[in-house]
Amino acid sequence: MRIVKFFVGLVFCVGLAQVFMASGKQRPQNIEAPAKRQQPQAVTPAPPEKPLPKPSTDTAETREKLVDALVEQFNPAPAGWAGFAVRKVELKNVGQVAVTLNYSKQPSGYPQVQADTKKVVRACLKWIQEQGHDPAKEWITVIASAHLPEKGETGKDLVRIMGRSTYNFNNDQIEFKKDANLW
């Protein structure tokens, strides 16, 4: 009985396979060839509302412009200030502006250093925005450090770092660090 069921099942499977193979060879007459695909048309981006400024490089000209803006902002210079030294001006994405405020005499304390360096950072931020840049969107770091020239034990010229204020583009805030916590 089992052998009969096996042969009946085998014959059924062979017959079914022949039916499927025969139907695969014949092509019905009423099916059309697939339509040609249309190529997607190129999409042109809309022009920006205002042209983006070209990235500025760190040149003597941009440094001079920043020094002029700082001198204009702080004219006359507050008591105790000896001047500015612009170390770096990179106005581009992930750029940096670094300015040193030099004191001519000992400041009254860290609150004065904090206030002075924050004023310098704010003046730099104002100048950067006047140049057509957005420091927060372009990740431009602005650093203003305060230095006081001193003499060492042997008479060698030294510089005492009083502190620095840094513009943090992540939270759009100016942060101050004392000399011991700079790095």
Image (cartoon, helix red, strand yellow):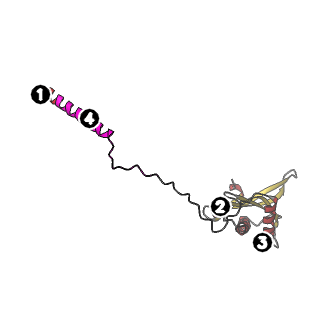
In what element is the residue under mark 2?
helix
**Mark 1 or mark 4: whose residue is earlier in sequence:** 1
Quarter location, residue 168: bottom right
**Residue to which mark 1 is pinned:** 1
**Mark 1 or mark 2: whose residue is earlier in sequence:** 1
At a point 29% along the width and 37% down the height, the residue shown is: 22
**Mark 2 or mark 4: whose residue is earlier in sequence:** 4
50 above or below 29?
below
Marks 3 and 2, how far apart at CA: 24 Å
Q: Which of 137 and 38 is in front in this view?
A: 38
27 above or below 178?
above
At a point 68% along the width and 55% down the height, the residue shown is: 181
Marks 1 and 2, how far apart at CA: 85 Å
Q: Nearer the viewer, residue 63 or 11?
A: 11
Determine which of the numbered discs, if any, sits on residue 156 in the image.
Answer: none
Q: Give the range drawn in magenta.
A: 7-36
Q: How crowded is mark 1: few (under 14 residues within 10 Å), some or many (20 or more)?
A: few
Mark 2 or 4, which is nearer the eye? 4
Where residue 65 appears, as percent x and y from the top left, is 80, 65
Queried whether the magenta region covers residue 27, the answer comes back as: yes
What kind of residue is marked 4?
A: Gln
What kind of residue is marked 1?
A: Met
- Left-right relation of 19 to 141: left
Q: Residues within 10 Å of mark 4 (few under 14, many from 20)?
A: few
**Residue to which mark 2 is pinned:** 138
Determine which of the numbered discs, if any, sits on residue 73 in the image.
Answer: 3
Mark 1 or 3, which is nearer the eye? 1
